[in-house]
Amino acid sequence: MPIYTAASLKAELNEKGWRLTPQRETILQVFQNLAEGKHLSAEDLYYMLQNEGEHISLSTIYRTLKLMARMGILRELELAEGHKHYELNQPYPYHHHHLICVRCNKMIEFKSEPILKIGSKTAQKEGYHLLDCQLTIHAVCPTCQRSLLPA
Amino acid sequence: MPIYTAASLKAELNEKGWRLTPQRETILQVFQNLAEGKHLSAEDLYYMLQNEGEHISLSTIYRTLKLMARMGILRELELAEGHKHYELNQPYPYHHHHLICVRCNKMIEFKSEPILKIGSKTAQKEGYHLLDCQLTIHAVCPTCQRSLLPA
DNA sequence: CAGAAAGTTGATAATCTTTCTAATTAAGTG
DNA sequence: CACTTAATTAGAAAGATTATCAACTTTCTG
């Protein structure tokens, strides 16, 4: 269920004096066709496109991901160590949060309507226009608790 | 109000087979002496120490910040673009969250007991040992909403 | 208290991300 | 549809973060 079609993306870009380019349209499509719960790093996206015969430079990819996150189209996730991941920013019934093991980086998604409410109320109270709110829980998973390995 | 004294840090490190070094103790002290609401990047910390005549290498600083975040002593914040910030991870009455403008990076801290409860319940339900939970709200502040500048 | 074992540091290299710049491309105007 | 203006791209360079490794410390053991 695409929230943003190419047309609505173009409209929103133009509203701000920006442009819809083939690269941006392509990147949006990739995220719309992604299975739920999936998320991509900049490199993931780069090589995925290469395999489909599309060449988009890494800098454009990084720039576009950042742009779409600032527009509220994508969410920037800080999951594993060392690199960010991106996913479509979907509204309520699909909106979710992340519980992450800091040792093994295992990640569990969970939903919470109250959090979304607190988030939008807080933004509203301060006069901010809400784009995304995500609760990130850092913790140690059962397996890693039992493990005696240092880390 | 230091939660971790040098002694309790040493105890926790030793429990896992790790060691309390002068560098780690120094870094902990810096964060304990930091005013509430203040947070530091790795570089901030590096130069702050240099000015005090302490030399700790950048790689040790990065390594120590990451380590203390994984222990639950520090929180890793994704505030401004381009680099992470760290602050002491404090319990309830001081525990807070962040509302961030994606345009100008202005940041507002806010507190919420319900979120902390949801976070700890979620972790518990999955058998995870909670270290930190932070709600990050990305939004556009009133000033930037009025601004017509592209960005 | 000497020797072994393991963790830590600092320097460097590697990786990930953002910034900069010239060339290109899309949108607006007549 | 040619022309002007401004945004965008690709590639290179710079900046931020993590990984690697030899030398050094600390802890443990006998």
Image (tube, coloured by chain):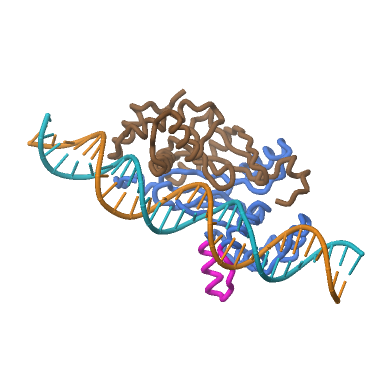
Chain colours: A brown, B blue, C orange, D cyan
Query: Dominant secondary structure of the magenta stretch?
Result: helix
Of the pair D16 and B133, the residue shown nearer to us: D16
Corner quadrant of residue B15: bottom right
Magenta residue span: B43-58
Could you say where residue D21 lies in the image, as x and y percent from the top left? 63, 59
Left or right of residue B110, residue D26 in this image: right
Could you say where residue C6 lies in the image, as x and y percent from the top left? 76, 57
Res A106 seen here:
yes
Quarter that holds the N terminus of chain B: bottom right
Magenta stretch contains residue B69: no
Magenta stretch contains residue B55: yes
User: Which residue does the image show at 77% across and 61% down from the upper left?
Assistant: B11
Could you say where residue A54 lies in the image, as x and y percent from the top left? 39, 31
User: Which residue does the image show at 38% across and 41% down from the upper left?
Assistant: A60
Res A129 seen here:
no
Of the pair A13 and C20, the residue shown nearer to us: C20
**Does B30 appear above or below B16?**
below
Could you say where residue A59 lies in the image, as x and y percent from the top left? 40, 44
User: Which residue does the image show at 62% across and 65% down from the upper left?
Assistant: B27
